[in-house]
Amino acid sequence: MAARVDWGRREYPAALAEMRRLVVERRAGRIADTLILVEHPPVVTVGVEGDDGAAAASGLPVVHVERGGKATYHGPGQLVGYPIVDLEPRGRDVRRFVHAVEELVVRSVEPFGLRASRVPGRRGVWLDGSRKIASVGVAVDHWVTFHGFALNVDPDLGAFERFHPCGFDGQVMTSMARELGRTVHVDEVRPFVAAAWDSAFGDAASEAVVPVPASA
């Protein structure tokens, strides 16, 4: 049985602390595999591969984290998903898990008429192999995953041009709103992400297994 929880909008440091706590809970078997959905106020996170220094010069808050990858932006209008999943019964296959997360995003945008895909050698989810609509970066602690994906629904894409997201020029980033030519609200997309999660990680997902953290 898998679970889902929606944190609404949370400051990144508070969400990160709670996510790390839930990793411990999952490792101990006290919670099920859980997908956290959240939006963050503007912030740049830098993964273990680092960045070229542009993140610090962006003028945005910067947080260094333990996920894979380089720097990326989180902000309003972006739906972030943190799957807390025990890989022990799934064969300890991190690459397969990352591919499953990417496929989850692909299925989430499909109902909107967007044909996204994975690109060999490039992490994340892409349109036509050239426009990146979602970033993916995970960490694993004792075979429990955390961090996850960031789907650009309708964020400020200009924020990506203030540094080099995932090592690319910021203009490579796109959003559902840009591709569809209309405003898209995160609330439109949540049900499709939830359905894709249920299909991939457990059809009997529950919304009430994981407590919502206190506001920062």
Image (tube, rainbow, N blue to C red):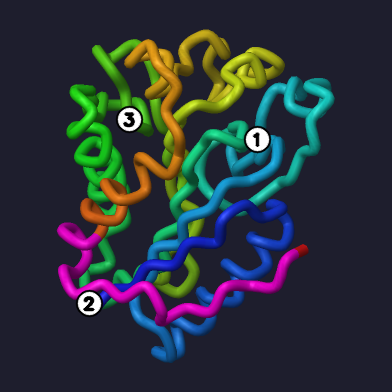
In the rendered image, the vertical position of residue 116 relative to residue 3, given as above or below: above
Residue type at mark 2? Pro
The answer to which quarter of the image holds residue 203 is bottom left
Asked if the residues shown at circle 1 and circle 3 are in contact, with their CB atoms under 8 angstroms apart, the answer is: no
Q: Secondary structure at mark 1?
A: loop
For the residues marked 2 and 3, what is the alpha-carbon distance in whole angstroms? 26 Å
Circle 1 residue: 50
For the residues marked 1 and 3, what is the alpha-carbon distance in whole angstroms? 20 Å
Circle 3 residue: 125
Is residue 135 visible from the viewing direction of this image?
no
The picture places residue 191, in percent across and down from the top left corner, at 30, 51
The answer to whether 114 appears left or right of 207 in the picture is: left
**Sequence order check: which comes first, mark 2 or mark 3?**
2
The answer to whether 58 appears left or right of 158 in the picture is: right
Circle 2 residue: 89
Residue drawn at x 30%, y 70% as measured from the top left: 87
Task: Say whether residue 209 is magenta.
Answer: yes
Main secondary structure of the magenta stretch: loop
Q: Which residues are magenta?
A: 198-215
**Sequence order check: which comes first, mark 1 or mark 3?**
1
Residue drawn at x 60%, y 44% as measured from the top left: 48
Quadrant of the image containing the C terminus:
bottom right
Residue type at mark 3? Val
Residue drawn at x 42%, y 70% as measured from the top left: 144
Nearer the observer: mark 2 or 3; the answer is 3
Asked if the residues shown at circle 2 and circle 1 are in contact, with their CB atoms under 8 angstroms apart, the answer is: no
Residue drawn at x 24%, y 12% as measured from the top left: 128
The answer to which quarter of the image holds residue 188 is top left
Q: Secondary structure at mark 2?
A: helix
Tell me, for residue 210, which label it has, or none: none
For the residues marked 2 and 1, what is the alpha-carbon distance in whole angstroms? 31 Å
